[in-house]
Image (cartoon, grey):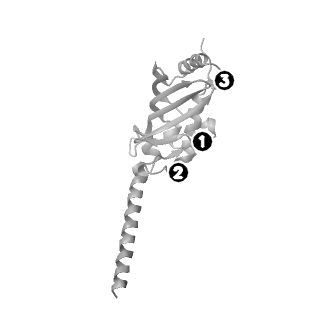
Amino acid sequence: MVDCAYNMESMLRFIAISILILLITAAATPALAQKYDHFEVENNDLIWRYTFDYTGSTDSLRKEIVQMLKSKFFTFNVTRNEVGYMGEINHYKVNCKQYGRTYYNTPRMYWDGEWIGKFKVEVVDNHYMVTIYALYYEKMEQSIGYYRTEKPVKGRYIDAVTKKHQTAFKKSELANMVMMSVGLRNDFDIKNTVLIR
């Protein structure tokens, strides 16, 4: 009888320790970075990173990056540092039609929203890496009522595409994130730049 009680006590202790380990693991899981199509959650922010290949010297790459940044209407306050360039993004718009989207199958945040954020371009031989972070959107939303006025709605991109507590990306936003990623990749690619003389 004593052996049975001892076995039951050790079994309960094993179950309690197992549950404690599972709870600790589950609590630590949200701190892990979530990644999807060049987007990544880091330190309560959504970051987009992409590395572009380049054949040529670092000096010629820097010249082309300067031309690319000058040609973009949405890049502001660009400064050079020892690694590359950094600046702000204002009035960025995703060209949804270019990616086969229509007004009816695209959230207004992407269709007629404007984006603000920050970017960093790091220059290294044979490639450059673009990092975009602190993305916010602003869209116009119609009020319900007699006058039907529009009011601006603003928000952080990370809050729009992640589930509560930023543990995972919303499945309904994955296709939109791919479109946003392709748009950013096309807009920051030197090959797609029209040179300014």
- x, y percentage for residue 38? 55, 40
Which quadrant, please, contains the C terminus? top right
Nearer-N-terminus badge (3/1): 3
Residue at point 61%, 22% (across, down): 193
Classify mark 3: helix, strand or loop: loop
Q: Do the residues labelled 2 and 1 touch (CB within 8 Å)?
A: no
Reply above or below: 44 against 60.
below
Q: How far apart are marks 2 and 3 (CA)?
A: 38 Å
Where is mark 3, residue-wise?
A: 55
| Amino acid type, label 3 | Thr
| Between marks 3 and 1 in the image, the one whose residue lies nearer the viewer | 3
Q: Which mark is residue 165?
A: none
Residue 66 located left or right of residue 43: right
Residue at mark 2: 172
The residue located at (50%, 32%) in the rendering is 131
The kind of residue on which mark 2 rests is Ser
Hey, which residue is sitting farthest bottom in the picture?
1
Q: Mark 2 or 1 closer to N-term?
A: 1
Specify few, some or many for label 1: CA neighbours under 10 Å numbering under 14, 14-19, or 20 or more: few
Total numbered labels placed on residues in the image: 3
Q: How far apart are marks 2 and 1 (CA)?
A: 16 Å
Q: How crowded is mark 3: few (under 14 residues within 10 Å), some or many (20 or more)?
A: few
What is the x, y in percent for residue 184? 56, 33
Q: Distance between the residues labelled 3 and 1?
A: 37 Å
Q: Can residue 93 be seen in this view?
A: yes
Task: Find disc 1 in the rendering and name its residue.
Answer: 102
User: Please, is residue 72 above or below residue 17 in the view?
Assistant: above
Three-letter amino acid code at the position of disc 1 = Thr
